[in-house]
């Protein structure tokens, strides 16, 4: 992976302010020297602002639509992300429960699941 490829992968998180101090410094230093990555920073920033603007202009769904979606998804898995292999992997998941969306993270080591965190109240979320 080239240096620019790494920086381009970090640009969205740089804009969001969610990088570690070391990564933030790495991106900032690279941007002072690389016009192509600065151009990507500008384009990504514009895209983010455009998406935020469009989403901000959308009307909120009607209360009955919210209620129907909540009724149909309550307790169901909304998202699941698994990265890794049999030997080592990371799993993140989210499901709708009442008026919250608990998120859990598991580390899979040699087929054994180790719960890293669970923002839900119940320990038995799967």
Image: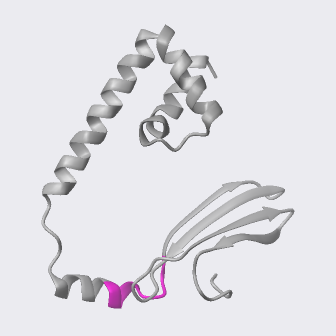
Residue at (38% x, 23% y) in the render: 40
Q: Can residue 6 be seen at all in this image of the molecule?
A: no
On the image, the x and y values in percent for residue 29 come to: 55, 17
Q: Is residue 97 visible?
A: yes
Q: State the image quarter where residue 109 is shown.
A: bottom right
Q: Which is more toward the observer, 1 or 50? A: 50
Task: Give the answer, above or below, for where 1 lies relative to 15.
Answer: above
In the rendered image, residue 28, in percent from the top left (x then y), is placed at: 51, 22
Q: Quadrant of the C terminus?
A: bottom right
The quadrant in which residue 88 appears is: bottom right
Compared to residue 47, the image places residue 7 above or below, namely above
Q: Is residue 31 left or right of residue 91?
A: left
Q: Could you say which quadrant of the image residue 67 lies in?
A: bottom left
Query: In the depicted view, which residue is nearer to us: 23 or 10?
Result: 23
The span picked out in magenta is: 70-77
Residue at (12% x, 66% y) in the render: 59
Query: What quarter of the picture does the N terminus occupy?
Result: top right
Instruction: Count numbered badges in the picture.
Output: 0
Please tell me whether residue 3 is drawn above or below residue 21 in the rendered image: above
In the displayed structure, would residue 106 be above or below residue 97? above
């Amino acid at each position: 992976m080239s240096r620019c490829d790494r920086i381009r992968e970090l640009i969205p998180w740089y804009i969001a302010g969610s990088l570690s101090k070391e990564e933030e410094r790495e991106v900032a230093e690279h941007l002072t020297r690389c016009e192509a990555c600065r151009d990507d920073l500008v384009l990504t920033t514009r895209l983010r602002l455009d998406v935020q603007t469009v989403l901000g202009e959308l009307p909120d769904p009607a209360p009955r639509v919210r209620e129907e979606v909540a009724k149909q998804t309550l307790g169901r898995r909304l998202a699941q992300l698994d990265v890794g292999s049999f030997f080592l992997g990371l799993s993140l998941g989210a499901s709708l429960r009442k008026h919250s969306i608990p998120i859990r993270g598991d580390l899979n080591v040699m087929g054994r699941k180790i719960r890293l965190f669970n923002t839900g109240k119940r320990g038995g979320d799967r």
